[in-house]
């Protein structure tokens, strides 16, 4: 098998694995967020500042998750472009 094709298959597999794992992680985090929201709705004893702190925490977590995904996707593209350029130079 050609090394270029083998690398492309390996990269595609890694990207697919990342996408599937990230989707599963996102689903779990969203379910956890729903549980926290339900708890906070029922926790009348919690002051509004506490609710805001938890909301800020959840928002920061989402932002971090999305930035992580963007960074990984950007780096996958860089690797793909690097090997595409190398392949074009070899021809």
Image (cartoon, helix red, strand yellow):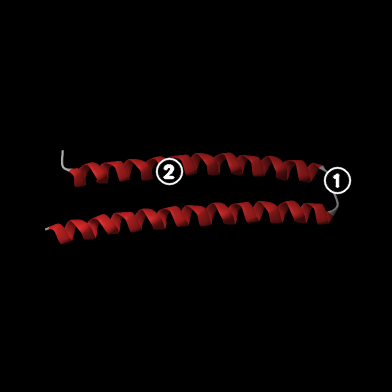
In the rendered structure, find residue 68 and report the number of the disc placed on it.
none
Give the SS element for disc 2: helix
In the displayed structure, 48 sits above or below 42; it is: below
Mark 1 — residue?
Answer: 44
75 shown above or below 27: below
Residue at horizontal 30%, vertical 41%? 10
* Mark whose residue sits in front, 2 or 1: 2
Give the total number of marks visible in the rendering. 2
Observer-nearest residue: 73 or 33? 73
Which is more toward the observer, 38 or 55? Answer: 55
Crowding near pointer 2: few (<14 within 10 Å), some, many (20+)?
Answer: some
Q: Split into 4 quadrants, where in the image is the C terminus?
A: bottom left
- Reading the chain from its start, which is encountered first: label 2 or label 1? 2
Label 1 element class? loop
Asked if the residue at tag 1 contacts the one at tag 2, i.e. Cβ–Cβ closer than 8 Å, the answer is no
Residue at x 46%, y 56% (from the top left corner): 71
Residue 52 position, x and y percent, is 76, 56
**x, y percent for residue 55:** 71, 54
Q: Position of residue 59 (x, y in %)?
A: 65, 55
Return the residue found at the far left.
91
Residue that appears at 60% across and 44% down? 30
Q: What residue would you read off at disc 2?
A: 18
Quarter of image, res 37: top right
Identified at 76% across, 55% down, the residue is 53
- The N terminus is located in which quarter? top left
Is 45 left, or right, of 80 in this rendering? right
Question: Where is residue 45 shown, x and y percent of the image?
Answer: 88, 45
């Amino acid at each position: 098998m050609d090394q270029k094709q083998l690398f492309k298959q390996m990269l595609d597999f890694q990207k697919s694995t990342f996408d599937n794992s990230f989707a599963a992680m996102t689903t779990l985090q969203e379910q956890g967020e729903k549980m926290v929201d339900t708890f906070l709705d029922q926790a009348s004893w919690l002051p509004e500042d506490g609710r805001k702190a938890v909301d800020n925490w959840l928002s920061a977590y989402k932002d971090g998750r999305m930035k992580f995904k963007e960074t990984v996707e950007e780096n996958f593209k860089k690797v793909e472009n690097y090997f595409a350029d190398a392949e074009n130079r070899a021809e």
